[in-house]
Structures are given as structure tokens and as C-alpha cells.
């Protein structure tokens, strides 16, 4: 009568057992290879996303600087016009205030 340990050894050393070990080893190698490929793909995607975000940030900064310069120029132009024609500026401000008042009252 054989023991369970002997039966296990016989099964493991049989041609079918060796085939099963080779198949398991091959599956492990394939899984490791796929894992490496997925890791490389994920790191590449993260790098590309970082590069894109940096590029967008740089472009937004340049555009903000342009708008800030334009706003400063407009403010200076309005200030100069107000200094040259203070009465006209007051009339325009009064007209805009009157129109805003009409719009806000009619919204209710």
C-alpha cells in the first residue's frame, strides 16, 4: 500500500506532472511579461499627460500675460479719456447706471 506522499511524488514526476509544471511556468512568464508591458504603457501615459499639462499651463500663462497687458492698456486709455472729458465720463456713467437700474427692476 502506498502513502499519499508517495502517490503525490509519483504524480509530480510523471510526464503529465512535468507538463503541468512547464505550463504553469510558461503561464507565469507570460503574466510577468504582460505585467511589464502594462506597467510600461501606464508610465508612458502618465509621462504624456504630464507633458500635456505642462504645455497647457505654459500656454495659459502666456495668454494671461497678454490679457493682463491689454487690460492695463484699456484701463490707461479709459483713465486718459476720463481726465480729458470728465463731464462726458460722468454722463456715460449715469447712463449706464440708469440702464442697469431698469434691467434689474424689470427682472423682478
Image (tube, rainbow, N blue to C red):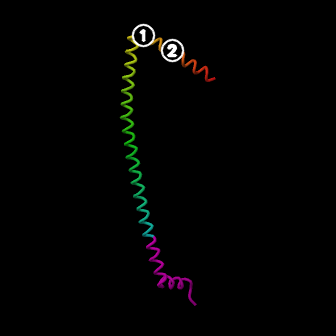
Q: Is residue 54 magenta?
A: no
Residue drawn 40% across and 10% down? Answer: 85
Marking on residue 72 = none
What residue range appears in magenta? 1-27
> Label 2 belongs to which residue?
95
Q: At numbered mark 2, what does the secondary structure look like: helix, strand or loop? A: helix
Above or below 56: residue 101: above
Q: Say which quadrant the C terminus sits in.
A: top right
Return the x and y of residue 40 as percentages of the image width and height: 39, 58
Q: Residue at x 38, y 43 (%)?
A: 54
Within-10-Å neighbours for mark 2: few <14, some 14–19, many 20+: few
Residue 74 lies in quadrant: top left
Question: Residue placed farthest to the right in the image?
Answer: 108
Q: Which residue is mark 1?
A: 86
Which image quarter: residue 77? Answer: top left
* 6 w.r.t. 94: above or below: below
Front-most of residues 95 and 19:
95
Give the foreground label among 1 and 2.
2
> Residue 61: x, y in percent?
38, 35
Which quarter of the figure has residue 59?
Answer: top left
* Disc 1 residue crowd, few under 14, some 14–19, many 20+, Cα 10 Å: few
Number of marks in the rendered image: 2
**Local SS, label 1:** helix
Looking at the image, residue 85 sits to the left or right of residue 8; the answer is left
Amino acid at each position: 500500500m502506498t502513502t499519499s506522499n508517495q502517490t503525490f511524488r509519483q504524480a509530480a514526476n510523471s510526464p503529465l506532472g512535468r507538463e503541468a509544471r512547464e505550463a504553469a511556468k510558461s503561464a507565469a512568464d507570460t503574466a510577468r511579461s504582460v505585467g511589464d508591458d502594462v506597467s510600461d504603457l501606464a508610465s508612458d501615459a502618465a509621462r504624456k499627460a504630464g507633458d500635456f499639462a505642462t504645455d497647457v499651463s505654459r500656454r495659459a500663462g502666456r495668454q494671461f500675460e497678454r490679457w493682463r497687458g491689454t487690460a492695463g492698456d484699456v484701463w490707461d486709455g479709459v483713465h486718459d479719456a476720463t481726465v480729458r472729458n470728465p463731464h462726458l465720463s460722468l454722463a456715460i456713467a449715469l447712463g449706464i447706471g440708469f440702464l442697469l437700474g431698469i434691467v434689474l427692476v424689470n427682472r423682478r
